[in-house]
Image (cartoon, grey):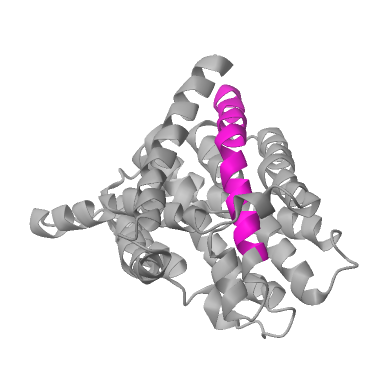
Amino acid sequence: MFFDNLKTIATQVLILYLIAGIGFVTDKVGLFKKADAKRLIDLLFNVILPIAVIHTFMTMEYSKEHIKGILIAFVCAFATHLFGAGVALITFRKRSLKEQGIYHYAIILSNAAFLALPLAKSVIGNEGIFYCSVYVAVFNMVAFTLGIYEISGHEAKIDLKKLVLNPGSISVLIGLPLYFLQLDIPHFISYPMEIVGNCNSPLAMIVFGTFLANSSFKNMFAKKEIYFVSFLRLVLIPLCMLGIFYVCGVRGSLLVAMIISASAPTATNTAMYAAKYENDTALGSEIAAQSSVLSIITMPVVVALASVLQ
């Protein structure tokens, strides 16, 4: 059963990375460059992803199991980020605050929106987006507060308003009432939302491919510190959370969705925020790129294990 799940999930991961290959190739030939992708990211995070999340919530069938699942997903997502922050806190303590901040950001924050959501949709379906969107909301809360504080070298102040005023949280806050009310949304509204939401996965992976195209493969595989960060991000944290979730009784699609999110590679925006807060952009890119490449091997194994335990 484990190997059947491994084969299925590895196939889905491979498909996503093949789509990322489009971004890789188009960047190399100059058709769609990283600068273009950066502009598209704003559209993805602020419009397309929220629409996908809201549409999933408003079309998901109401059940007591899903209500309980949402609450558990919030707890699991916060627990994963808290555990990651605890792990990060004891690492790279002798480095400068700036360098330390990049490593910590990379350890704590996964590429949940760009890779986990598309993979969850492929493996679990709409229920995967339903639960992973909660994880993405928590990701945004952490990224816009603790994440920015870390990657700025403790120079940027934590803005508590960002806990709610971010695209991930707002989309969930809009989606939840629609889910509970179970309104009969007209087709001329629901169908365009579905079409736009379906753009999230391929566009996110194409953008992701452009970032890989601009990474130094020589540097990313030369630094032992990056291997250590990838080990923590891809192996230690997801396996520890899998054990914790299983002992706490988390099962089914919820368990798989949370582990998909927890096992995703380092967030692509590590490099973007490093640039914004005058940190080492190259290091951020190298960490995100290496963990992304290695996740082709680690994610199928970890997620297949979660699928067996569910």
Residue drawn at (48%, 28%) of the image: 9
Q: Is residue 223 left or right of residue 68?
A: right
Residue drawn at (61%, 67%) of the image: 142
Report the predominant secondary structure element of the magenta stretch. helix
| Residue 288 highlighted magenta (yes or no) | yes
Q: Nearer the viewer, residue 254 or 136?
A: 136
| Residue 270 highlighted magenta (yes or no) | no
In percent of width and height, residue 38 lies at 41, 69
Q: Is residue 225 left or right of residue 246?
A: right
Residue drawn at (73%, 62%) of the image: 103
Q: Nearer the viewer, residue 184 or 12?
A: 12
Q: Is residue 108 above or below residue 123?
A: below
Q: Is residue 265 visible?
A: no
Placement of the C terminus among the 4 image quadrants: top right
Residue drawn at (39%, 35%) of the image: 15
Of all residues shown, which one is farthest toward the front?
29
Number of numbered discs: 0
In percent of width and height, residue 4 lies at 50, 16
Q: Is residue 185 above or below residue 173?
A: above
Q: Is residue 217 left or right of residue 118?
A: right
Tell me the magenta residue range. 283-310
In percent of width and height, residue 163 lies at 55, 74
Q: Is residue 153 above or below residue 182?
A: below
In percent of width and height, residue 58 lies at 28, 54
Q: Nearer the viewer, residue 239 or 91?
A: 91
Placement of the N terminus among the 4 image quadrants: top right
Of all residues shown, which one is farthest toward the right?
94
Q: Is residue 90 visible?
A: yes
